[in-house]
Amino acid sequence: MHFPTTEHHTLDAHAPENPLTRYGWDEGFAADFAPYSARGLVPARVVRVDRGRCEVATADGGGTTTVPASFGAVSTHDPLRRVCTGDWAALDPRPADGAGASVEALLPRRTAFVRSASSKRSDAQVMAANADLAVVAVSLSDDPDTGRLERFLALAWESGAQPLLVLTKSDLVADAHHLVADAAEAAPGVPVFAVSSETGEGLDVLTAALAGSTAVLIGRSGAGKSTLVNALVGEEVQQVQAIRDADGKGRHTTTRRELLLLPGGGALIDTPGLRGVGLWEAGAGVEQVFSEIGELAGDCRFHDCGHVAEPGCAVLAAVEEGVLPQRRLDSYRKLLRENARIAARTDARLRAEQRRVWKQRTALGREIQERKRGGAPRRER
């Protein structure tokens, strides 16, 4: 799934400010909402979803209020269209049946952070919608897992939001410079921040980067997300638990996705810690994470080069010359294969085509290796 680059729409400077501006409301969303005004509906932003109901923020006089709402009117079996935190909605605040506020429609999403749900069915799960920034939190208390970092960044790019990489717990390492450098190498085009929620180091710079935007915070359990949220919001809004001494893994402190206002402007969508995260239609995101491979591929002899064993492959040449680390190429291949498997499960024709292409590439690689050894190529039976 790929969304266009996020556009920011500013409200008329001479018009009274809509109180929902604090939640990210702008002229673009106002234009999308216009058809619903005649029905007596009002705009609202989903701040929390829980067991078939949600809480939404809506205007109340000159301020805002948060109210519970049902969303049966927009219920669907399509996991990509279900109500989620960050959605903008058309709300009926006083339905005729007196049952309470009701979400009657969802406005088009600008961005959506989607992962493969934790099930063998490979269903999609939308974790957050309409985020301008995707903040990936990684703890410096242990050497960052570069492969996991690349996976998170692929989903972040695919969401349509601008990724930010936040390296937490910088106070726990004597010299974080080399760890920051390693992380930055795995995150081309992504701003990197090293912060400590305990000492406050780097928080002012991160706060400035988040101001005026909606950001979604993602990361594995134990990355210090809850402590970071409390530091950014300026109060204890999330319970903090220590990581387990036995294996260093974190406990799930945050149990649901929740949108919180930031004191300096903007909003933050906190999400539960993830032990694992599966790709979902993230091909463009993978290419963005490994953009240097895409640039090198432009010099390959064949335009459809698979960078396996093809003659004239500029990517393989870069590996041999030490320009491109072998680990980066291996990770790139792994994520592309995983993303392709997800797509193949829902498309039998694509699956058959992939088998044919992989078989051809395997045969080509075997033939080239045989020629290098001076032997005659084996014929496929």
Image: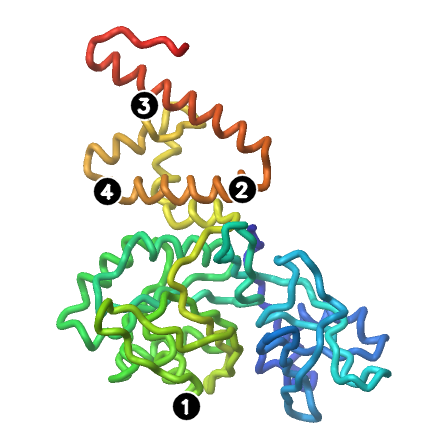
Mark 1 or mark 2, which is nearer to you? Answer: 2
| Within-10-Å neighbours for mark 1: few <14, some 14–19, many 20+ | few
User: Which kind of residue does numbered mark 3 sit on?
Assistant: Gly
Earlier sequence position, callout 3 versus callout 4:
3
| Label pair 1/4, CB-CB below 8 angstroms | no
Mark 3 or mark 4, which is nearer to you? Answer: 4
Earlier sequence position, callout 4 versus callout 2:
4
Earlier sequence position, callout 1 versus callout 4:
1
User: Which of the pair 181/81 is nearer the observer?
Assistant: 81
Residue 41 falls left or right of residue 316: right
Q: CA distance from mark 3 to mark 4?
A: 18 Å
Which residue is disc 3 drawn over?
A: 312
The residue depicted at 75 percent of the width and 78 percent of the height is: 102
Which residue is disc 2 drawn over?
A: 343
User: Which kind of residue does numbered mark 1 sit on?
Assistant: Glu
Counting the numbered discs, the total is: 4
The residue depicted at 37 percent of the width and 59 percent of the height is: 190
